[in-house]
Image: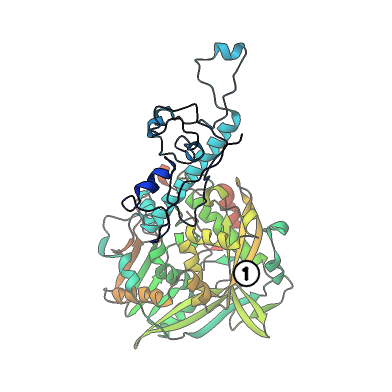
Amino acid sequence: MVGVFEVGAVPFNADGWGPLDSSTTTPAASTTLPLHVPFAPFSRSEKLGRIADFTRNFANANPSNRPSGKPGSASESPFDFSLDIDAFPLANPDDDSSFRLVDAKPPTRPKFGPKWRFNQNRPQLPQRRDEEVEARKREAEKERARRDRLYNLNRSNQNQQRREAAIFKSSVDIQPEWNMLDQIPFSTFSKLSFNVPEPEDLLLCGALEYYDRSFDRITPKNERRLERFKNRNFFKVTTTDDPVIRRMANEDKATVFATDTILATLMCAPRSVYSWDIVIQRVGNKLFFDKRDGSQLDLLSVHETSQEPLPEAKDDINSAYSLSVEAAYINQNFSQQVLLSDGDKVSFNEPNPFANEGDEVASVAYRYRRWKLDNDMYLVARCEVQSVVEVNNQKSFLTLNALNEFDPKYSGVDWRQKLETQRGAVLATELKNNANKFAKWTAQSILASADLMKLGYVSRVHPRDHFNHVILGVVGYKPKDFAVQINLNTSNMWGIVKSIVDLCMKLNEGKYVLVKDPSKPQVRIYEVPADAFENDYVEEPLPEEEQVQPPTEDAEAVESDGIKNDVEEKEIVA
């Protein structure tokens, strides 16, 4: 016969939900309820578990750890969950000793065979794939550490200190009889500012050829070979050897005379790392800024402000001097190749003042311009432009310059892969490695009032071949906009020039030389004899092993291009 299910009396709780408090529960009601019926507090968000399980029967079992007033009472078993650890884990605290964690890992596969038996105690070598993964992780970690180190160097301005730690030689041999008058740290230049009015053109000489717009469409996929112009003459004439400047000085057109190359060197002096020198001559109330024969100002620096030092071996094709000669050679040939060869030219008032009758002269025009520095002080400078182009039926002057890539491992950016898709990254890398050269090119374009400056990307055919090059692209910029992009302040540029002019005007008549210190960010002014740097002045020669000899083929190439330093057509020498 099926047992009758008896439900005990449930008291009514008028004060709220749930059973009555023990103090208010009557003895009769408390004795009629089944014993050991668990009650767990819960909220509405929780799920309710089981209330009763009639499938269990503990009639014949009375565990010793389960206290009960009625041992073996079958009527209480459906409501007794004291042994159900899942429902009430705290009901049996004494059973915690039998609790153990279950390992969910798959069991290790046994390794059988003689190889496993004999090599049980030997350490196992990692798998090939693990080695590759670890190697890639190590390389990534090294690259991340290198980037962090370079970032910290840039943030703390330690790049200058690192390059200063390298051994750089002075551009001129300081003689013992020279008297140092003053030294100016670059930190004082950053605070200078001076505004000049618009300049006036006194004279235009030479002739210009038109720019070939087809070079704007060159890409690394349709590159062009850089040609050599051996028959064209390029002149690098200093200030006092210029017949036009001599004539203007006799006519008292100005007080200070210079060239755009010398002015750009002064304006961008705080960005320079390599040593340079400028000869200053005070004659009466006039001031002449000159360069020496064979001066570094005739060459173009390469990777001057980069963080990776160049090889120090003088015979290395990637040394600082070899790259400077190569850059000057590339820049001259590039400036003539991007022109139209149809014979159409724009001529000016006077022909080229440095060319002889019948000479084939490179496309260049000289603008002699005058700036007002003070009420009674004017500056005249010879500025150069290399080409002309018609825009809206108006002629616009252009300056042409070329960047050269010698080995992608030094810059970390391969132009042939990145120039077409990531031109901004290529330009940013070049701005970091050649900040001084970019600033000088921009300053020369602003001095000449060029409407556009063209920058060519020229690379070696092979990293070890420094004689053959290809043009990978040409980009044009407006000089003033590009100056803002590279953080070049025009007022600060003229402030540096004005301060040096004021300092030199206080000196007595004579000859002086302004030298950039090879190891510190500062310039020094020396008083030198009147016959210094002349042909009859013999300086103490350097030892033969310290003399820089240009590569033979480079020297022949430069000579064949007809580089001349003065009216007598002196070649550039080391």
- Front residue of this view, candidates 374 and 535: 374
Give the mark count: 1
- For mark 1, give the secondary structure: loop
The vertical placement of 107 against 373, above or below, is above
- Front residue of this view, candidates 255 and 71: 71
* Display colour scheme: rainbow
The amino acid type, in three-letter code, at marker 1 is Val
The residue that mark 1 highlights is: 361
Q: Quadrant of the N terminus?
A: top right
Q: Residues within 10 Å of mark 1 (few under 14, many from 20)?
A: some
Residue reaching furthest to the right = 342
Residue 108, position as x, y percentages in the image? 57, 24
- Front residue of this view, candidates 353 and 302: 302
Residue 502, position as x, y percentages in the image? 30, 77
Q: Residue at x 51, y 30 (%)?
A: 103
Residue reaching furthest to the bottom = 375
Decide if residue 25 is in sight here.
yes
Residue 65, position as x, y percentages in the image? 39, 29
Q: Residue at x 31, y 51 (%)?
A: 23
Q: Residue at x 46, y 77 (%)?
A: 381
The vertical placement of 514 against 29, above or below, is below
- Front residue of this view, candidates 247 and 334: 334
The vertical placement of 249 against 279, above or below, is below
Decide if residue 407 is in sight here.
no
Residue 453, position as x, y percentages in the image? 57, 72
